[in-house]
Image (cartoon, rainbow, N blue to C red):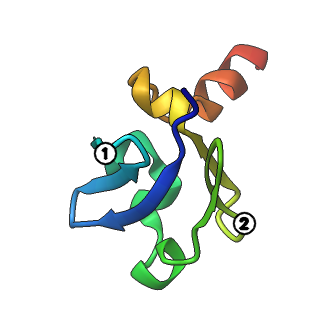
Amino acid sequence: MNISPESVRFDDATLWVSLTDGRVIGVPLTWFPRLLAASASQRALVELSPGGLHWDALDEDISVQGLLQGHGDRTRNRIMSVA
């Protein structure tokens, strides 16, 4: 089964993603520091694809698979492990 995002919304502390299989996933914005720091208008510029979410201006990509597995932003971990 291929599960894709249908819509995205935010409240003060949470990113909410509605999926094509009927589930709604809520994750803390603290998992994604770029989204946490972004304005509401920047967050609204999300592009939905079959595999996930993309914010071009914020350089943020979130996969549906990663959300389902409970993964937050891994960029910081990758940068720290290279240093």
Helix, strand, or loop for circle 1? loop
In this view, 23 is above or below 66: below
What amino acid type is highlighted by mark number 2? Asp
- Residue 23: x %, y % from top left: 29, 41
Check disc 1: other Cα within 10 Å, few if <14, some if 14-19, many if 20+.
Answer: few
- Residue 6: x %, y % from top left: 46, 58
Q: Residue at the spot x=65%, y=47% of the render?
A: 50
Check disc 2: other Cα within 10 Å, few if <14, some if 14-19, many if 20+.
Answer: few
Q: Nearer the viewer, residue 66 or 57?
A: 66
Q: Which residue is mark 2?
A: 56
Sequence-earlier tag: 1 or 2: 1
Q: Confirm or deny contact between disc 1 and disc 2 (CB under 8 A).
A: no
The quarter holding residue 45 reads bottom right
Q: Residue at the spot x=70%, y=14% of the render?
A: 81
Q: Residue at the spot x=64%, y=41% of the render?
A: 51
What amino acid type is highlighted by mark number 1? Gly
Q: Residue furthest top?
A: 81
Q: Residue at the spot x=22%, y=66% of the render?
A: 11
Q: Nearer the viewer, residue 28 or 81?
A: 28
In this view, 5 is above or below 76: below
Helix, strand, or loop for circle 2? loop
- Quadrant (top left/top right/bottom left/bottom right) for the N terminus: top right
- Quadrant (top left/top right/bottom left/bottom right) for the C terminus: top right
CA gap, disc 1 to disc 2? Answer: 26 Å
Q: Residue furthest right?
A: 82
Q: Would you say 58 lies left or right of 23 here?
A: right
Q: Would you say 24 lies left or right of 4 here?
A: left
Q: Nearer the viewer, residue 66 or 51?
A: 51
- Residue 38: x %, y % from top left: 47, 70
Q: Residue furthest bottom?
A: 41
Q: Which residue is mark 1?
A: 22
